[in-house]
Image (tube, rainbow, N blue to C red):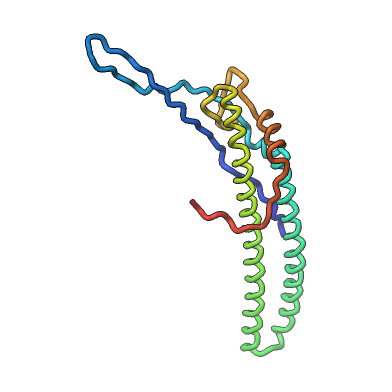
């Protein structure tokens, strides 16, 4: 049975803060004053979410929790799968000597046990994924105000993930700063079995 270790695959988040500015222009020989909304120039900082998940204390704790839950599932279901395999071997020997109606009943009972195990394995996988999704949301909630503070400090109005940046002539990566502050705000994060969050 393969491991249940789940890769945290959250989408690259882009945090945008509205920076609406207006420029007032006086029109010659007209009594009215026209105002136009000017689009602010993008001032960007960059983070690497994969690095944050891999190196932050909370991200490492999340992955450790997932590994523990996966190992527990492996141990639990592996023994049940081995027991089911033994039943299958015994059933093959019994089917050769039982009546047809009894043979069909025993086959159906075995298939029911087999399907039940598969269902429980799938449900456990889903609950691990659900707990991982909830923990990911908690990490995002802790990270967002940190990024907003860094944006104000850097006079930025946009945060991009490193994967969205093809080329940059200046160093605008604030991943290290974000990790340092996230470690202070959220030193650990535990993944617990949970139903997957309902789709929004």
Residue 102 on image: x %, y %? 65, 88
Q: Nearer the viewer, residue 43 or 184?
A: 184
Q: Residue furthest bottom?
A: 99
In this rendering, position of residue 29 left or right of residue 117: left
Q: Nearer the viewer, residue 15 or 100?
A: 15
Residue 73 on image: x %, y %? 72, 60
Residue drawn where x is 58% and y is 21% of the image: 168
Q: Nearer the viewer, residue 8 or 61?
A: 61
Q: Residue furthest front?
A: 31
Residue drawn where x is 72% and y is 75% of the image: 88
Residue drawn where x is 50% and y is 32% of the image: 16
Q: Residue furthest top?
A: 28
In this rendering, position of residue 165 left or right of residue 73: left
| Residue 142, quarter of picture | top right
Q: Is residue 135 placed above or below 152 in the rendered structure?
A: below
Residue 188 on image: x %, y %? 72, 44
Residue drawn where x is 62% and y is 45% of the image: 138
Q: Is residue 115 placed above or below 48 in the rendered structure?
A: below
């Amino acid at each position: 049975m393969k491991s249940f270790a789940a890769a945290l695959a959250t989408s690259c988040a882009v945090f945008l803060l509205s920076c609406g500015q207006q420029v007032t222009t006086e029109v010659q020989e007209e009594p009215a004053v026209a105002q136009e909304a000017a689009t602010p120039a993008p001032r960007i900082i960059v983070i690497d979410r994969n690095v944050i998940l891999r190196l932050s204390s909370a991200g490492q704790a999340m992955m450790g929790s997932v590994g523990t839950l996966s190992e527990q599932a492996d141990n639990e279901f592996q023994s049940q799968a081995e027991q089911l395999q033994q039943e299958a071997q015994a059933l093959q020997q019994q089917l050769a000597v039982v009546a047809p109606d009894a043979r069909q009943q025993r086959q159906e009972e075995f298939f029911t046990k087999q399907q039940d195990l598969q269902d429980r394995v799938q449900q456990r996988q889903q609950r691990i994924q659900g707990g991982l999704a909830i923990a990911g949301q908690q990490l995002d909630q802790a990270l967002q105000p940190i990024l907003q503070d860094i944006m104000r400090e850097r006079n930025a109005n946009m945060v991009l993930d490193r994967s969205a940046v093809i080329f940059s002539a200046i160093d605008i990566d604030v991943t290290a700063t974000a990790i340092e502050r996230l470690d202070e705000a959220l030193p650990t994060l535990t993944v617990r079995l949970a139903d997957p969050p309902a789709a929004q």
